[in-house]
Image (spheres, grey):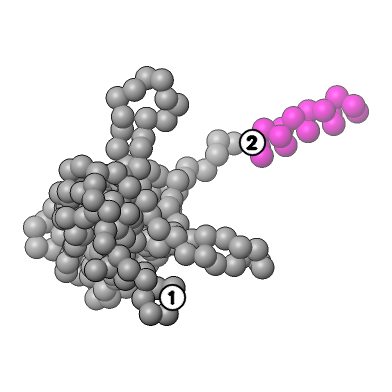
Amino acid sequence: MATSVTVALTVASAVGCGPPERQDAGAPSGRFAVEVLSASFPTAQRLAQTSRLEIVVRNAGNRTIPELAATVQGFDTRVARSDVADPRRPVFIVNARRRSIGGEPEVQEIAPGANRTALNDTWVSGPLAPGATRRLVWSVTAVRAGRFRLRWSLAPSLYGRAVAVDRRTGRRPAGEFVVRVSDRAPQVRVADDGRTIVAR
């Protein structure tokens, strides 16, 4: 009898311990047409200056985009040194605002979807219905002087075989900004209210 119980437990364990479900199981596939209405980022900036990177995109297809994702590469750069644990160094810091979660103080990035995904330099902003338009905005501050190249691209989902296609070009919606950051700090003053900082 004891042997039968042992066999039954072994079989039950085997049935319950199959391979884990793929992360992209049930993920969308196919092509999703989009139209990039505008993409902007100041090409001349200064250290400690706050700027907006903005991409305005419209769903030009007849299907809802399941999870509009935006990737921006270039907010940081790599240093050629072998004596550091992480060779990445920030060029632009994504700004954040204070908020409260469950009564506890927290900060939230001023970026699409509020927070970055587990994928490097990628944010998601949720579904986008056919014909709808979304403004993707990052508030960033330059912390390194020099000439930098930022590349951006859009996708309809983080996983699966779905691809976004620019309605006008037939290619993946993508672009780049070439930015020069001066080492001169911005000229600012305190407004009459004693709190607001105003650029001159």
**Whole-percent x and y of residue 191?**
36, 76
Main SS of the magenta part reads helix
Judging by the rendered image, the residue that carries numbered circle 2 is 17
The local crowd at label 1, few if under 14, some if 14 to 19, many if 20 or more residues have their Cα within 10 Å, is few
Whole-number angstrom distance, CA of label 1 to CA of label 2: 64 Å
- What's the residue type where badge 1 is placed? Gly
- What's the residue type where badge 2 is placed? Cys
Marks 1 and 2, the one that precedes in the sequence: 2
Q: Visible in this render: residue 16?
A: yes
**Whole-percent x and y of residue 182?**
20, 49
The local secondary structure at tag 2 comes to: loop
Query: Compared to 25, does 20 lie above or below?
Result: above
Residue closest to the eye, 41 or 13: 41
Magenta stretch in the rendered image = 1-17
Q: Residue at x 34, y 22 (%)?
A: 81
**Whole-percent x and y of residue 155?**
28, 55
Q: Residue at x 26, y 58 (%)?
A: 186
Numbered badge on residue 194: 1
Q: Is residue 34 left or right of residue 3?
A: left
Q: Visible in this render: residue 151?
A: no
Report the residue that reaches farthest toward the right.
Answer: 1
Residue closest to the eye, 179 or 167: 179
Q: How many marks?
A: 2
Image quadrant where one finds the C terminus: bottom left
Q: Residue at x 38, y 80 (%)?
A: 192
Q: Is residue 27 left or right of residue 163?
A: right
Report the residue that reaches farthest toward the left.
Answer: 169
The local secondary structure at tag 1 comes to: loop
Numbered badge on residue 124: none
